[in-house]
Image: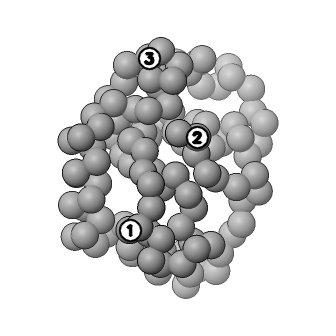
Amino acid sequence: MEHGGRDVQVYKSNEERTQANAMYQTTRWARLRAKYLSSQPLCQSCLKRGIVTPATDIDHVFPWRPLGKDAFYANYYQCQYLPGFQRDRFRGNTGAGESLFQLLPCGF
């Protein structure tokens, strides 16, 4: 499943960002995250590239902020290897070349 991210980064106010980040600190999120990581322990992006890498986090397939707080928990998720996932977002937003990230397990 492809990530449902945006092409352009939209920056929120500090208050909005603080409120959104607080949702990742809830017990409910911790349980949901643990459930998905135990049921899908490998990075989905890495597997698409033929690389087996343990997942370190889960990602909302559809961006929840534009949809509202209910979409934070009522969403589709994919397990990801965080450094590789951050690389994909960085490259998608800036058009950076592969050479910076060649050593990451999710690299091409």
Q: Earlier in the sequence, mark 3 or mark 2?
A: 2
Viewer-side label of 3, 2: 2
Question: Looking at the picture, which amino acid does disc 3 mark?
Answer: Ile
Quadrant, the C terminus: top right
Disc 3 designates what residue?
51
Question: Looking at the picture, which amino acid does disc 1 mark?
Answer: Tyr
Q: Position of residue 105 (x, y in %)?
A: 46, 21
Which mark is on residue 2? 2
Q: Secondary structure at mark 2?
A: loop
Viewer-side label of 1, 3: 1
Disc 1 designates what residue?
73
Q: Earlier in the sequence, mark 1 or mark 3?
A: 3
Residue visible at 44% across and 77% down in the picture: 70
Q: Is residue 74 left or right of residue 61?
A: left
Residue 96 visible in image:
yes
Residue visible at 39% across and 75% down in the picture: 22
Q: Secondary structure at mark 1?
A: helix
Q: Position of residue 97 (x, y in %)?
A: 74, 26
